Image: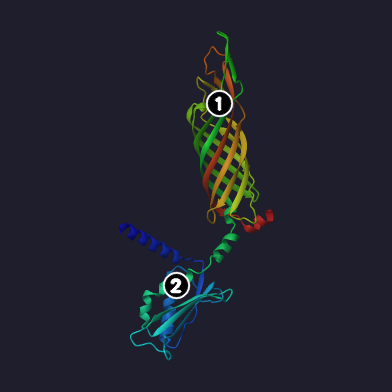
Amino acid sequence: MRKSGVFLIILLLFTTALFAQSREDILIHVLPVVAARPDHALFFRQHFETEVAGANYTLTDDSRIADFLINLEVTNNMVLYDDGWDLPPEDEPQFLVTLTLVNNETGADMVAFSWPFTEPFEMYEHSLTMVYSAMANVPLTRLGDLAATDDRWRNQWLYIALAFNYPVISAYQILTPDTYIQSPPQAQRLPNMVIPNPGGTIAVEFQFLNWMMGLFNFTLRFGDPMAHTQFIPSISLGAAFPIKPTTINWIKIVPFLMASTTGNTATTHDILSFPRFSIGGGVQIAFRASTRNALFVDISYLHSLSDVVTRNPLGSDWIPDKIHYTRWVVSIGFGFKFGFMDRDPQFVDEED
């Protein structure tokens, strides 16, 4: 019983939330109520205006700019008897209020339903349900149109991005795989190394042209044993070239080029030299998250400009005594970027 009760409560809350959709960007106009009694006309117009505003829709007094119209009509509640239609008995509801939701652009009636009552105050318990039930039939076309034309998220002057990078694959390709010992004569081949480790990035992106951005990244990578340190910080400068498909405005593709310098690379007894400078590039794919912000995923490749040099791990009797590795890093990042300062749409069009 308890499980069934919990399930019913969850179902009720879900159903209520589904029907209780509301949007402040929707303009609603309540038309003058058609009613035989003036008190009915005054009560229902004022009451439904209050309910519409309470449901977080925006009321407007100008029917010409409204997205939807609410048309209310109060009539006598008629009952069908064997000999035809007539007024109901005194112990049954005497009146009927009918709500019709009208699409103001097309003039079409979207939905209409009625509720019986005798005294207007009885509708306090039911009018909000009527509003929610009506607005549940409102298509999300206006919101979709706004999203289709709102391209601000792709045209901000400044972005601050936070990313988690994993895996960060540091690959070391050995340049002298064969190492030898003379006494007794033997040879042994040293392997290449591929080391995955996590990292994080804070990035600043400045979009000074519609088709070009400047990049500044600070990245911290963890746990690379070849660097003989717990973390490797690096600073990168680069240029990006955003591609903004006109037919798909919820995506932005950003190829980029980058140069990087690595810190915390002091030599040790075993690591004789660790490269400080790298060059490379990659691509970022960003997806619209809100008016100015975006989710993104990126993949990058950096190639070190000098070798990693270590002592021969087999010992001092083996030759050569120094082993050279080529180092390159592939990183996959997942993050979120915050946009600041809208670029002027006219300025953007002129650049194109």
Extreme residue in the left direction: 1
Q: Residues within 10 Å of mark 2 (few under 14, many from 20)?
A: some
Instruction: Count every numbered label the image shows and give the total.
Output: 2
**At 54% from the left edge and 72% from the top edge, which residue is drawn?**
67
Residue 108 coordinates in the image, percent (x, y): 56, 76
SS category of the residue bearing label 2: helix
**Quarter that holds the N terminus:** bottom left
Three-letter code for the amino acid on which mark 2 is drawn: Val
Relative vertical location of residue 172 with respect to residue 131 in this rendering, above or below: above
Extreme residue in the bottom direction: 83
Q: Is residue 131 left or right of residue 158?
A: left
Q: Residues within 10 Å of mark 1 (few under 14, many from 20)?
A: many
The Cα atoms of the two marked residues, 2 and 1, are separated by: 69 Å
Residue 36 coordinates in the image, percent (x, y): 44, 88
Relative vertical location of residue 290 with respect to residue 99 in this rendering, above or below: above
Using the rendered view, name the quadrant where residue 132 is placed. bottom left
Residue 23 coordinates in the image, percent (x, y): 48, 65
SS category of the residue bearing label 1: loop
Q: Which mark is residue 131?
A: 2
Q: Which mark is residue 115?
A: none
Relative vertical location of residue 255 with respect to residue 22 in this rendering, above or below: above
**At 52% from the left edge and 16% from the top edge, which residue is drawn?**
314
* Residue 52 in view here: no
Residue 10 coordinates in the image, percent (x, y): 38, 60
**At 59% from the left edge and 45% from the top edge, which residue is drawn?**
284
Using the rendered view, name the quadrant where residue 146 is placed. bottom right
Q: Disc 2 or 1, which lies upstream in sequence?
A: 2
Per the image, the residue denoted by label 1 is: 274
